Image: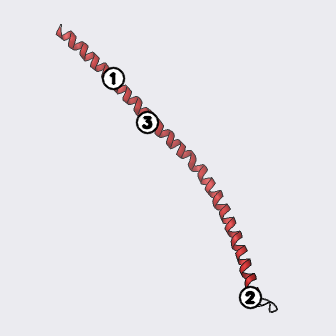
Amino acid sequence: MDDEKPITEQALETISTAVEATKDAAVTAVKKVKKAAKKVAKKVAPKKASKKKAEKATKKSSKKAAKRSVKKTARKAAKSKKKAKKAKR
């Protein structure tokens, strides 16, 4: 440190340079974190979308299966009615 400057002035300079360095480091850290977050978001986003698509597909397939089973039971009931009518004759 300079002996010509007062101690308070030297301390203020040291603190201000430390603050600036910390600020710069914080800014660069934030930029890096944002960049990393974007990369992760790009990797994760398609997986989430595919999960939603998979859920929709399972819902659709379960609905179709339910409709088919209802149709089958209706057909079986109709056939059993016909058989019962024939048996009565």
Question: Farthest residue in the bottom direction?
Answer: 3
Q: Tell me which corner region of the image, top left, top right, bottom left or bottom right, holds residue 40.
A: bottom right
Task: Check disc 2: other Cα within 10 Å, few if <14, some if 14-19, many if 20+.
Answer: few
Look at the numbered disc 2 and give the secondary structure of its residue: helix
Q: Which mark is residue 72?
A: 1
Q: Quadrant of residue 66?
A: top left
- The amino acid type found where label 1 is placed reads Lys
Which comes before the other along the chain, label 2 or label 3? 2
Q: CA distance from mark 2 to mark 3?
A: 72 Å
Q: Amino acid at mark 2?
A: Thr
Asked whether the residues under the numbered discs 1 and 2 touch, taking CB atoms below 8 Å apart as contact, a structural biologist would say no
Q: Quadrant of the C terminus?
A: top left
Sequence-wise, the earlier of marks 3 and 1 is 3
Looking at the image, which residue sits at the far right? 4
What residue do we see at 69% from left, 65% from top?
28
| Image depth: mark 2 or mark 3 in front | 2
How far apart are the alpha carbons under marks 1 and 2?
92 Å
Which image quadrant: the N terminus?
Answer: bottom right
Q: Secondary structure at mark 1?
A: helix
Image point (76%, 82%), residue name: 13
Do labels 2 and 3 touch, CB within 8 Å? no
On screen, residue 45 above or below 15: above
Residue 37 image offset from top left, x and y in percent:
61, 56
Q: Residues within 10 Å of mark 1 (few under 14, many from 20)?
A: few
* Image quadrant assignment for residue 73: top left
Task: Identify the image's colour scheme: rainbow, by chain, secondary structure or one colour.
Answer: secondary structure
Image position, residue 11 (x, y; %) = 73, 85
Residue 59 - label: 3
Dot 3 alpha-carbon crowd within 10 angstroms: few under 14, some 14 to 19, many 20 or more: few
**Residue under circle 2?**
8
Q: The residue tagged with tag 3: helix, strand or loop? A: helix
